[in-house]
Image: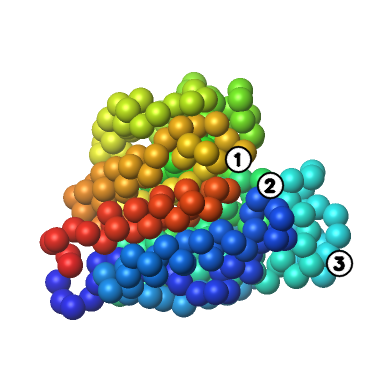
Amino acid sequence: MDARKKLGIMFGDELAEYHFGQDHPFGPKRYWAFKEEFERRNLSALVSLYSPQVASEAQLKLFQTQDYINKAKTLSDAGSGFLDCGDTPARKGIYAPACTIVGTTLAAIDHIMNGDCVCAFTPIAGLHHATPDSAAGFCVFNDCGIAINYLRQRYKLQRIAYVDIDAHHGDGVFYSFESDPDLVFVDFHQDGRTLYPGTGYIEETGKGHAAGTKLNIPLPPNCVDQTAKELWQHAEQFLRQAEPEFILFQCGADSLEGDPITQLNLTSDFHAFVAGRLSIIANQHCQGRLLAMGGGGYNLENIKVAWNDVIEQLGADPGFL
């Protein structure tokens, strides 16, 4: 490989504009915490930095309905009420930064597919709760769902793996692709009987022709790394058998001990472990093509360590650097 770096980072202060207020759990300090630690570790020397981009309405429509896009615009302009049933505030002007999150995720895919980098990370991304016709759980648009359809439409890839270790089940992705046999889905999350959104049970494995292509792994409250790593062995075998063409990795930091709205006791070692294992699978099955997305996380110290540990793991392969 030439002098290009293996890993690309989507990096820009515009990403901090996706938030719901200074005192909201999903506030602007999440990005600043990530950036501070990224710079403290001097990781820019190991990666290529790429600027955020803005999604077009046509790109949003790869997953979102036109009626919902119109609703999001209207409520964003008004700056009052909620974009869903009460979880996602219609902060004034939120539509534009929501488009930036989606556009940046798609730009990361472009950088990978165009050969600028082998894999990539984007911090404020992985908004996995939004459905085609509604926001949900702080997610205005579902950049994960849009990314899946973008890979298929623009790059003609079909067999895509979506791996999620956020404490919350990626319900917006799961139910939207529940009957899609080519979307391989693996999701570690806190048991839905104890945490929002109350979904992701082990028996939910896909419907119709997609039966058996989805793997939900609910974790009990207070779950620790050893338990999660033992469960990972089955997940890895499942992914290898699927032989994906591209891996999307939602690495939410809210599954770490000390998050204010979840109850798992994982450490960043699990995030680094999964990142490393996925990197190996990607190298063996899909030319290294992997996009990691920051996802949730509401303890700023956890965000700092988890996301930057993932970056170090993805960028550290001596075969590329």
Is residue 36 found left or right of 157 in the rendered image?
A: right
| Residue at mark 3 | 78
Q: Counting other residues with Cα less than 10 Å from the Cα at mark 1, is it few (<14), some (14-19), or many (20 or more)?
A: few
| Residue at mark 2 | 136
Single out the mark in the foreground, 3 or 1.
1
Q: Nearer the viewer, residue 273 or 244?
A: 273
- Residue name at image x 27 percent, y 30 percent: 233
| Residue at mark 1 | 260
Q: Counting other residues with Cα less than 10 Å from the Cα at mark 3, is it few (<14), some (14-19), or many (20 or more)?
A: few
- Residue name at image x 48 percent, y 26 percent: 222
Q: Earlier in the sequence, mark 1 or mark 2?
A: 2
Badge 1 amino acid:
Pro
Helix, strand or loop for disc 3: helix
Q: CA distance from mark 3 to mark 1?
A: 30 Å
Helix, strand or loop for disc 1: loop
Badge 3 amino acid:
Ala
Asked if residue 205 shows in the view, the reply is: no
